[in-house]
Image (cartoon, helix red, strand yellow):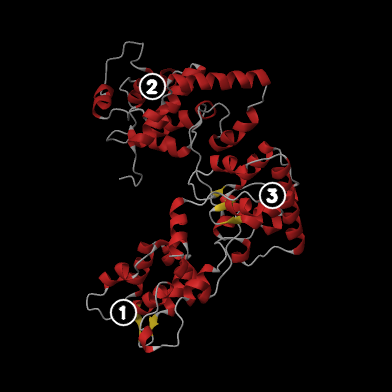
């Protein structure tokens, strides 16, 4: 028994490739296989079957050794020979020489070809767009051969019908998390070029966790107490990690940082348990200080004040790569130029940035910043623009709200914040 598992979809894909080649060059497999069967019993040896596809027809059809082996396995009879008649009938139909029908009809009825996916068909609008694209290419006389040479190397056939889905290649430089600083300054905004986040101390990690809990009003006990049926305040490290993931702390902590937090709260008497109650008390310090009656000299609200002073996540201050004097001078010069343009020409940048703020969170992409400034006529040098992006960028993107506040075009305060401000004076 052969170890290779022949998939029907792969066989039909290979047959479609042969059919396309036959239509393109006028190939007829009957003329190649009929002389090898003088007895006319529709059976030939496997070596003869393979010698045609792997020999004179390899450069015409462009089949690989694996595809030829799949065809031989699929059309092999019980005695080891290959039913070439079935393959030829699937590709060309019945033989024009008047040969009687064989079991190929039964094969087509029992194993019909897979249906064509709906995504492979073009509607009238897509067809019209394709025709316009081809007309544009023809008008500009753009050479297309260099763009298809990689596919020729992949299939080893200049006239092969290519598959639009190329295999994904391994990217060791991305998996290793190497810094892109040696590449220099670039205007390409690809996730692979994002510099890796530097390691942080445990106190910084817990401040970020407290900030996350305070902003989203997370009750930590609701995600961890179900793992503690005896209410002993200790759970396993695996259960603690699942609770952190359920809270959404994966957006704040990397897997290595989550392991660091887990090890910090291990029970000193039992290294297989995590003191989740202690973790809950540390997170809830941004809301209140427990057992405050036992410590009358403690001033509540210190943790919340420390969290409020944290820089935005992903900013230059948070990553430890603070702007140098030269970068600060460039950012200040760019800010002065933007402020001068807004005041001299009465420009309002708020609608321009709001059009690109899809999530309405006060952030846009770096590419959107360049488009907005170019559209309003504020032309900055490349170095100034990069310094401005580094100054106002964080994990969510470019914070145009902070830029507008320093320019003097602050956004209007929402009504609910205005009501909260009034309550403070009551």
Q: Which quarter of the figure is the N terminus placed in?
A: top left
Q: What element carries label 2?
A: helix
**Of callouts 2 and 1, the N-terminal one:** 2
> Which one is in front, 375 or 411?
411
Q: Name the residue under label 1.
A: 234
Q: Is residue 28 left or right of residue 349?
A: left
Q: Mark 3 points at which residue?
A: 186
Q: Mark 2 points at which residue?
A: 91
Q: Which quarter of the figure is the C terminus placed in?
A: bottom left
Res 72 seen here: no
Q: What element carries label 1?
A: strand
**Of callouts 2 and 3, the N-terminal one:** 2
Q: In this view, does 153 lie above or below 200?
A: above
Q: Residue 272 carries which label?
A: none
**Residue lying at 45% horizontally and 65% vertically, measured from the top left:** 424
Q: In this view, does 196 lie above or below 142?
A: below
**Residue lying at 45% horizontally and 27% vertically, measured from the top left:** 17
- Where does residue 212 sit, x and y in percent of width and height? 44, 65
Q: In this view, does 105 lie above or below 163?
A: above
Marks 1 and 2: in contact by CB < 8 Å?
Answer: no
What is the spatial separation of the Cα atoms under label 3 and label 1, in whole angstroms?
49 Å
Q: Nearer the viewer, mark 2 or mark 3?
A: 3
């Amino acid at each position: 028994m052969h170890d290779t598992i022949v998939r029907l979809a792969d066989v039909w894909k290979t047959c479609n490739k042969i059919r396309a080649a036959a239509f393109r060059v006028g190939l007829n497999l009957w003329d190649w296989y009929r002389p090898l069967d003088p007895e006319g019993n529709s059976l030939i040896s496997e070596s003869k079957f393979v010698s045609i596809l792997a020999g004179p027809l390899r450069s015409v059809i462009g089949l690989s050794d694996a595809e030829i082996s799949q065809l031989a396995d699929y059309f092999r009879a019980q005695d080891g020979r290959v039913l070439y008649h079935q393959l030829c009938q699937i590709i060309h139909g019945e033989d024009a020489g008047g040969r009687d029908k064989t079991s190929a009809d039964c094969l087509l009825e029992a194993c019909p070809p897979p249906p064509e996916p709906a995504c492979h068909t073009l509607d009238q609008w897509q067809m019209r767009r394709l025709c316009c694209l081809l007309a544009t290419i023809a008008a500009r006389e753009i050479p297309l051969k260099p763009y298809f040479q990689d596919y020729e190397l992949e299939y080893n056939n200049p006239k092969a019908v290519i598959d639009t889905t190329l295999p994904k290649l391994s990217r060791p430089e991305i998996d290793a998390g190497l810094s892109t600083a040696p590449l220099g300054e670039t205007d390409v905004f690809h996730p692979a070029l994002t510099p890796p986040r530097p390691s942080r101390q445990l106190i910084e990690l817990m401040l970020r966790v407290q900030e996350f809990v305070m902003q989203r009003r997370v009750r930590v006990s609701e995600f961890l107490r179900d793992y503690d049926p005896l209410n002993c305040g200790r759970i396993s490290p695996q259960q603690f990690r699942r609770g952190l993931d359920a809270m959404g702390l994966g957006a704040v902590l990397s897997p290595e940082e989550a392991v660091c937090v887990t090890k910090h709260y291990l029970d000193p008497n039992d290294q297989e348990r995590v003191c989740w109650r202690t973790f809950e008390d540390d997170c809830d310090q941004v809301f209140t200080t427990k057992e405050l009656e036992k410590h009358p000299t403690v001033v509540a609200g210190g943790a919340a004040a420390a969290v409020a002073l944290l820089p935005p996540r992903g900013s230059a201050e948070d990553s430890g790569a603070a702007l140098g004097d030269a970068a600060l001078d460039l950012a200040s010069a760019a800010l002065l130029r933007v402020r001068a343009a807004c005041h001299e020409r009465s420009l309002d940048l708020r609608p321009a940035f709001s059009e690109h703020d899809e999530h309405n969170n006060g952030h846009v992409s770096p590419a959107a910043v360049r488009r907005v400034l170019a559209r309003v006529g504020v032309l900055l040098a490349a170095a100034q623009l990069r310094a401005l992006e580094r100054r106002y960028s964080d994990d969510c993107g470019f914070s145009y709200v902070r830029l507008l506040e320093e320019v003097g075009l602050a956004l209007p305060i929402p009504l609910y914040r205005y009501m909260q401000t009034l309550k403070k004076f009551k």
